[in-house]
Amino acid sequence: ARAHLCQGHNVEVCIPYYSSLEGKVEDVQHVMDFDVPKGEQWEWDGEKEIRMSDFQWSMYSGKIGGCPIIALRPAFREGSNLFVGQRIYGGSYNEAEAYLSFCRASLECLRVTGRDPNVIHVHEWQCSAVAMLYWDVYHAQGLLNNAKVMLTIHNMDNTGECREEEFMATGVPGSEFNTLEKAMDERTIGHNPERLCLMKGAIVYSNYVTTVSPTYAREALNGSAGFLGKTLLKERTKFSGVINGVDTEIWDARLDNFLPANFKPGTMEGKALCKKYVQMGLGMNVDPHKPLVVCISRLVPQKGINLIEHAIPRTKEKGGQFILLGSGHSDPPFQNLAESVYKNDKDVKLLIFYSDALSHLLYAAADCVLVPSMFEPCGLTQMIAMCYGALPIVRKTGGLADTVHDVDDPSMSDSKKNGFVFEGADNNSLDGALDRAMRYYHERKPWWKGMQEQVMDIDNSWERAGEEYVQLYRMITGIREDNDHY
């Protein structure tokens, strides 16, 4: 959004006003309260009854990171716990009810404020109902006429399953969408009751659908999307992948305030200082000649935790150092390793938590960053690593395959080579890439320094990604390049 704003487009981001955002929104102002239709479905003696009412929401304006936002929440917090709590996802509230209500409120907000944008760009299952409601309610009734709708899917593992009666939170009976052609979840056919899949509905109703990398899009069409694959194949002419970008206002070795020394291609001395700073700060052996492998990851099966565990002793065996920063469902095994096998190890540090400030330091200190994901829709870790002159070691999947090209790949030009890639999901496959990285660091010093500078010059910014989205906006709206300020 910020990249589009900088290009002169008219951008507003509509989000729930989570209670955890209190005090974090710049220039926040209460704009108005407005009524939003809401329904409830009751069943008595086998007979269904629908009760309609209005639910009052509050609209706030403000900025986050300089980007204009519209923040919406129920007007009377004491009467609703929607979006209350310190966690954005998986909080104490009913997520289906919360996001379905928000979808209706966001469209009603556009209507009552007279906004009629060229593009409504929605993300994930949480906002999928916007596409469905826009076309079958607001556009059908002439309430909003101008917009085209784009959906971006970040992870097809989370599809937004809900019951018909839950969909009534939008004020529209779920039965209106619960058909195979619209939003019925094929996994529930024959169940009593059959359910809706919100993401499927948004795929059907959106003018265009993107996911976050071309390879992840191809993988989805080839079976990795599960039951959604059938819908995506049917709608494949309006489906593609666009690589996400890195926020270079946050991740930039040239300007990063978290670093003891900044650096850039041509003046890389600061990177060596960052490595020494981290080694000293974590009580490790201070040795510039040992390659430092960093892994910053959620510790969940998707991220290849077995490969991460294997890489720790393998890196040390090959003369390197290893630092893990991460947390997740698989904390206990890594915590046990940290407190036993590697407790006093001067070449291995397992930090089973997450710290944003420390992550900046580790990217800057790293010679390599390991990303051995089992699947990865896009991945930002490998792109952030390159912003700090660290060569990524990745498994070839999803966005990792699109952004990292092996230094020994003969099909790639030298200018596009930027890391070490392996394809298998086993230890031997990882060893092939990791061992090469360790060997090249020890034996090809001038080459390594040149690669560090080369990866830092790669454009992984949102400016690049944003322009791809602008081209798609032009395509679905028909707005010409000389008049495209949405």
Image (cartoon, grey):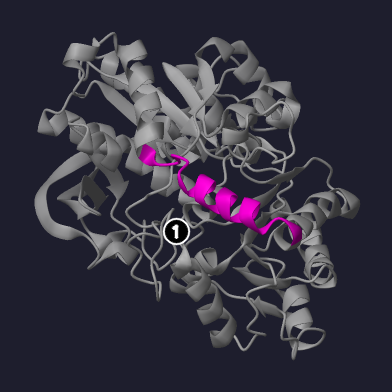
Q: Which residue does the numbered mark 1 point to in the structure image?
A: 93
Q: Which residues are magenta?
A: 443-462
Relative height, residue 3 to residue 318 (above, below): above
Where does the image place residue 405, in percent across and percent down from the top left? 65, 37
Q: Residue at x 66, y 59 (%)?
A: 445
Q: Residue at x 43, y 59 (%)?
A: 88
Where does the image place residue 252, in percent across and percent down from the top left? 38, 56
Q: Which image quarter: residue 222?
A: top right
Relative height, residue 161 to residue 434 (above, below): above
Element type where label 1 sits in the image? loop
Where does the image place residue 255, in percent across and percent down from the top left? 32, 62
Question: What secondary structure predominates along the stretch shown in magenta?
Answer: helix
Q: Looking at the image, which is closer to me, 232 or 143?
A: 232
Residue type, numbered disc 1: Tyr
**Quick check: 351 left or right of 189?**
left
What is the crowding at mark 1: few (fewer than 14 residues within 10 Å), some, or many (at least 20)? some
Q: Which image quarter: residue 2?
A: top left
Q: Looking at the image, which is closer to me, 303 or 27?
A: 303
Q: Looking at the image, which is closer to me, 305 or 227?
A: 305
> Is residue 422 on the magenta stretch?
no
Where does the image place residue 86, in percent across and percent down from the top left? 40, 68
> Is residue 449 on the magenta stretch?
yes
